Amino acid sequence: MPDAGRMVTIEVVQGDITRQAVDAVVTAANESLLGGGGVDGAVHRAAGPRLAEAGARVAPCAPGDAIATPAFDLPPPVQHVIHTVGPVWEGGGRGEADVLVSCYRRSLEVADELGVRSVAFPAIATGVHGFPVEEAARIAVTAVAAADTDVALVRLVAFDPETHAALTDHLHRHLTG
Ligand code: ADP
């Protein structure tokens, strides 16, 4: 029997990850942790230049791994940014799915080390990295649901309606078995 007291609540929203009232925000970083485009650019703009300075001190971050820094100028209650590096989609035969599962799992392990209770994730790897949205949404929901974590709330933040629909669909499928 799973311990119901440690079950993570998963919710799906459409919006901007820099505007979520959670303890930690995950960004889809590149290995340098210096900032990039897409969601990582938005997180770095909102957190300010100290985020790249802090990233540089702890980089590199390998694909599938996660490393935390302070959140700097991101608005409270956000205290931490968890930088994870997603797989670059090369057709699916190069372990991309395993790397994406690892991004979610390692980010939640880092969240546990930080002692945080709520974490927001973007749709890692589905932008510039090219991971198919449907499969990425399935992995996001199943990897978070399977995680052995003390985090109480995981919010999956979709930026666009297609990603929102895919995440909502897979969360519904998960909850209804
Ligand atoms: P990757 O390089 O891992 O593919 P991207 O940033 O290109 O990362 O895209 C990942 C996802 O993040 C995409 O669904 C993209 O639309 C979304 N995204 C972009 N900006 C934001 C934002 N401000 N908040 C939440 N999600 C965002």
Image: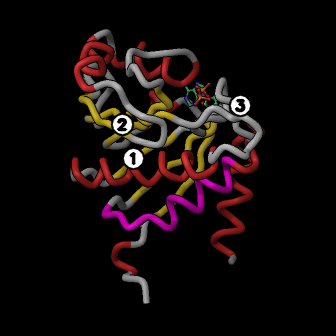
User: Where is the N terminus found, in terms of image quarters?
Assistant: bottom left
Per the image, the residue denoted by label 2 is 82
Q: Name the amino acid, label 2.
A: Ile
Q: Is residue 147 magenta?
A: yes
x and y percentages locating residue 138 in the rendered image: 68, 56
Magenta-colored segment: predominant secondary structure:
helix
Q: How many discs appear?
A: 3
Please give the name of the residue rendered at 37% of the width and 61% of the height, measured from the top-left corner: 152
Disc 1 C-beta below 8 A from ligand 1: no
Per the image, the residue denoted by label 1 is 107
Q: Quadrant of ligand 1?
A: top right
Q: Is residue 45 magenta?
A: no
Lower position in the chain sequence, tag 1 or tag 2: 2
Per the image, the residue denoted by label 3 is 130
In which image quadrant can residue 91 be found? top right
Q: CA distance from mark 1 to mark 3?
A: 20 Å
Q: Name the amino acid, label 3.
A: Gly
x and y percentages locating residue 164 in the rendered image: 70, 44
Disc 2 C-beta below 8 A from ligand 1: no
46 w.r.t. 93: above or below: above
Q: Secondary structure at mark 3?
A: loop
